[in-house]
Amino acid sequence: MKQALLNIQGDKVLWALAGLLALFSFMPVYSASSNLAYLYGNGDTFKYLIKHAVHLGLGFLIVYGVHKIPYNYFKGLSIIMLPIAIILLIVTIAQGTTIGGANASRWIRIPVVGVTFQTSTLASVVLLSFVARYLAKIASKTYTFKATILPLWLPVLLVVACILPANFSTAAIIFSMVIMLVFIGGYPLKYLSIIFATGLLFLTLFVLAAKAFPGAFSNRVDTWKSRIENFMDDSENSKDNYQIERAKIAIATGGLVGKGPGKSVQKNFLPQSSSDFIYAIVVEEFGIVGAVGIMFAYLLVLARLIIISHKCQDIFGKLLVLGVGLPIVFQALINMAVAVELFPVTGQTLPLVSSGGTSIWMTCLALGIVISVSVKSAPIEEKEMGEENPLDILSETL
C-alpha cells in the first residue's frame, strides 16, 4: 500500500479533490440508503455502505491504473474501443435491463459476475476521446465539411442515436459536449451550424416517429414531454413534481449548517435519494455550508482541468483533458440544478458522491485519463519510449 501511494503521480490537487468527494459521499449515501433498505431490503443499511465502498475502491483502482498509461496511448485505444462501445449500446437496446423501477432499459447484465453496467457512460468517455484524437489529427490541416462527415460525425451520430431512445438526457449531454469540444478544437462555426441544425432535424424526426409508432419506442417521448411540462407547471400531481417538491422541502429545512449527518427526514419520502437527488439530502443534513462546499469542490475540479489543459503542450492532450473532464463538472451542475428546480428532472447522478457503480467507475476512468495527461504535459516522443507505440501507428493510419 505504501509503495502504491509513493507511485501516485500527476496533479495532486485533483487527486485530493477526488478523494475528498469520495470520502464525503459515505455520509449522505449511508443516510439515504435507509430508504432503499426499507423498500428493497430487510432494513440493513450497512450492506449499501459496503457496496458503495466497493464501488469507490474499484473506481480508485481504475484511476490508479489508468493514470499510469501514457496519455498518447488513448489515441489508438479510442479507435479500438469505439466499435466495442457501439456494439454494447446496440446490445443494450436489444436486451437492456430496467434497474430501480426506471422506465428505460439502460443497463446490460454481465452474466459471469452478475453485475449491471450502464453502457452509455462508457460510450461517452470513449467517444469524446475519439473526437479529441481526430481534432488533434486535423488541427494543422485544411479540410472541408464533407471530409469530416464519415470519420468524425458518423461515429457521433451512431453513439447518440443508440442512446437517445432510452436516455435523452445522456444523449443530449454527449452531443453538447462533442459540440463544445469541436468548437474549442477550432472546428469552423459554419460547419458547426450545419451539425447543430442536423441534430435538431434528427431529434424532430425521432419524436415524430415515436409518436407515429408508440409501440416501437415505449413511452420515452411522453416521459420527456411530461418532464418539461412538469418543470413549467407548479402543481404537485406528477411523480416528477413529487420528487422536486420533496427535494425543495429538504433544501428549505437545511438551514445554515443542516440537521446533521443521518438526520434527514425527506430521505424517507424522496425516491432516488441516494443517487439522482442526493444533493437535496446533502443540503438538508449539512445546510448551506455543505451545499456551497460541494459546489466549490466541483468548481475546483473545473479549475484544475483548465490548468492541466493549459500546461499540456500537445493539442491532443489539451482536448483530451477537456473532452473527458468537463462532462464530470457539467453533470454535477445539472444534478444540483435539478435538485433546486433550475432544470427538468434528468436522472443524472452527482459524480463520486451519488451511489451507483457504473457512474463512479466511468468518472474514475475519466479522472485517470486527465491525471495521465498531467503526469507528463509534453507529448511522449517515440525515441523516449525506446520503441514505436503500436496504438499510435494505428491512430495515424486511421
Image: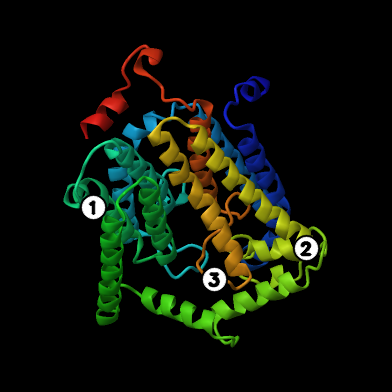
Q: Is residue 218 above or below residue 280?
A: below
Q: Secondary structure at mark 1?
A: helix
Q: CA distance from mark 1 to mark 2?
A: 46 Å
Q: Quadrant of the N terminus?
A: top right
Which quarter of the figure has residue 69? Answer: top left
Residue shown at the point (49%, 38%) measured from the top left: 309
The outermost residue toward the left is: 146
Residue shown at the point (29%, 74%) measured from the top left: 204
Judging depth in this view, the residue of 160 and 360 nearest the camera is 160
Measured as percent of width and height from the top left, residue 370 is found at 50, 37
Amino acid type, label 1? Leu
Left or right: residue 159 versus residue 63 is left
Left or right: residue 357 versus residue 21 is left
Of the numbered discs 3 and 2, the one sitting upstream in the chain is: 2
Q: How many marks?
A: 3
Residue annotated with mark 2: 287
Amino acid type, label 3? Phe
Residue shown at the point (25%, 76%) measured from the top left: 209
Q: Residues within 10 Å of mark 3 (few under 14, many from 20)?
A: some
Measured as percent of width and height from the top left, residue 15 is found at 62, 36
Q: Residues within 10 Å of mark 1 (few under 14, many from 20)?
A: few
The numbered dot on residue 154 is 1
Of the numbered discs 1 and 3, the one sitting upstream in the chain is: 1
Residue annotated with mark 3: 343
